Image: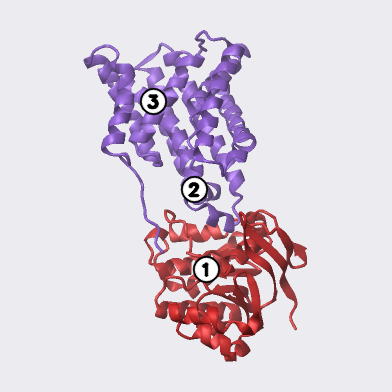
Chain colours: A red, B purple
Amino acid sequence: MAETILKVSNIETYYGPIMAIRGVSLEVEEGQMVTVLGANGAGKTTILKTISGVMDPQKGSVTFEGREIQKRDPDWVMRQGIAHVPEGREVFPFLSVRENLMMGAFTRTDRSGVDDDLELVFGYFPVLKERADQRAGNLSGGEQQMLAISRALMSRPRMMLLDEPSLGLSPRLVGEIFGIIRRLNEEQGMTMLLVEQNANMALKTAHHGYVLEVGRIVMEDSCARLMEKEDIQEFYLGVKDEGARGKRRWKKKKLWR
Amino acid sequence: MLINGIAVGCIYGMIALGFVLIYKATEAVNFAQGDIMMLGAFAAFSIIALLGFNYWVGLFGAILIMAVFGYALEALLLRPVIGQPQFAIVMLTIGLGFIFRTVAGAIWGHDPSAFYTPFTGKVSSFGPVVIAQENLAIIIGTALLCLVLYLFFTRTRLGVAMQASSQNQLAAYYMGIPVKRVFSLIWAISAGVAAVAGVLLSPLTLIDPGTMGFFGIKAFAAAVLGGFGSIPGALVGGILIGLVEQFAGRYLPAGFQETSAYLVLLLVLVLKPSGLFGQMAQKKV
C-alpha cells in the first residue's frame, strides 16, 4: 500500500453558529484519486476549504505529509504543496490566460521548470495555448475550468484538491475534463481529492470514495464497490429529481443511520 | 492656463490613482489619501528645508518614508478592520485624516511652508509657449510615474500578482500569493504616489495641513468621474477636473472655481454613476 499523504481527522467546521462539518475523517494515499460525494449542502466544499486553510476547523486536525496544516493561511498551505481548484473556477478575469498560468507558478522560482510545466499544461489542454493571450474572462466555461486546473498544476503540487470540476458544463465537456483528470492521475501520478455532485463520473474516475451527508461521512469504500451498492445506485446514480429526494429522506435512509 | 489646469489635474489624477489602487485591491476607500499626500509633502519639507539635503533626496526620501508609512498603516490599523462593515473603514480613514492633519499641524505648524525646488519661478519656452517649470515638472513627473506603475503592474511577477489579488482574492490565496502582504504593499505604493503628488504640488500651493486635505476630496471627485476602479480613468478624471476648475475660475462668477469639482462629482453621480471608464464584467458560471 502507498503511503498516506493527507489525513483529515475528525474535523468540525462552522459557518458562524452552523456546524457544517460534523466530525469528518478521511485519508488520501499518495498517487490515489479519492472522491467525496454528496448532495448540495452536504459540506463537500467546506471540507476542501478546511484543508486548504480558507476555513479553520474548531476541532480536529489536517495532516499533510506528516505535518499539521489546519488553521494556517491558505497561501502557506499552498506552499506546502496542496493546489486547490476552486468551485466555480475563479480565474482572474482581466489577466490573460498566460498570466493566469504564471500566477499558478507564483511561488516558484525555477524559470526553466516553469517553462517545462507550461508546455506540459499546453500539451494536456491545447485550446489554452491557442488562447494564451486572451483575457481569461472571455473564455467559455469549459475553457475556464481547464484553465483553473492548469493553473493549479503550474505550482507543481504534491496533491490537488478539485472542487466540482463538472459544475455548469455540458456532458461532453464533463467527459473531456474527467478524461484529462484521469490522465493526470495516471501519467503524472498526481494525488487528487475530488469533490463532485456528478457521482457517476466521479465513481468511474476515482479509486476510493466517501459519501457525505449533512456534514457526516456515511459510507466509505472503493469506487468499484460503491457503485454496486444499492443505495448509491438509487440515490446518487439514479434520477435525482425532487421525488427521489423525498423518497430518500423519508423511506430509505436506514442503511446508514 | 490650459497647462496650469492640466498640471493641477495631474495632481488630482495622482491622488485619484491612490484611491483607485486601494479601492480595486481591497474594496476600501481611503479618505485619508489627501492627508497622506500632505504628510508626504511635509516629509520632503523636513528633509530639504530642515535637514538641508537637496531636492531629489527629499523627493525620494519622502516616497520611501510614505511607502513605509502606508505599509505600516495597513498592517497595523486597517487589517484588523477588514471584514467589518464598509462603513467602519470609511470612518476609520476619515478619522485618520483628521489625526494626520492635527499631528502635522502640531509638528510643523499650521502656517504654510515651502522648500526650495529646482523648478521654482523658472520658465521654459517652447516657441511662443511659455510654461512654468513647476507645471512642467508635475506633468512630466506624472507621466513618468504612470509609466513606472504601468510597467510594474504588467511586467513584474509581483505587479501581476497584485492585479490578480484585486480581481479574485480567494483564487489569489489558492495560488499561494500572500494576499495580506500584497494589500499592505498596495497601500505602500499608493502612499508613495501620494508623496510624489505632494512634493510636486508644494511649489504651487505651499504646504499647509488645511488646504492639502481638500485636494483629497477633489481627487475623490476625479476618481468618481473616471469610474472608480479604473486606473486610466483616474488620470483622465483628474486632468478633466483640473481643467474644469481652471476654466470655471476664469469664465464663471467668483466661487465657482472652488465648487466646480463638486458640481462635476454630483453631475457624474446623477448622470453616469459608473463614470467614464467604469469597468464592469459579469462573472461567468
Q: From the viewer's perspective, is residue B57 above or below residue A85?
A: above
Q: What residue did someone put label 3 on?
A: B218
Which residue is found at the position 59% from the left and 59% from the top? A111
Quadrant in the picture for residue B13: top left
Q: Nearer the viewer, residue B263 or B164?
A: B263
Element class at badge 1: helix
Q: Give me the C-alpha separation between circle 1 and circle 3.
A: 45 Å
Residue B34 seen in render: yes
**Residue at the extreme left:** B251
Element class at badge 3: helix
Question: Where's the C terminus of chain B, which quadrant?
Answer: bottom left
Q: Give me the C-alpha separation between circle 2 and circle 3.
A: 25 Å
Query: Residue B54: horizontal and vertical position, in percent?
Result: 57, 17
Left or right position of B136 against B94: left
Amino acid type of the residue that numbered disc 3 sits on in the rendered structure: Lys
Left or right position of B126 against A15: left
Element class at badge 2: helix
Q: What residue did someone put label 1 on?
A: A149
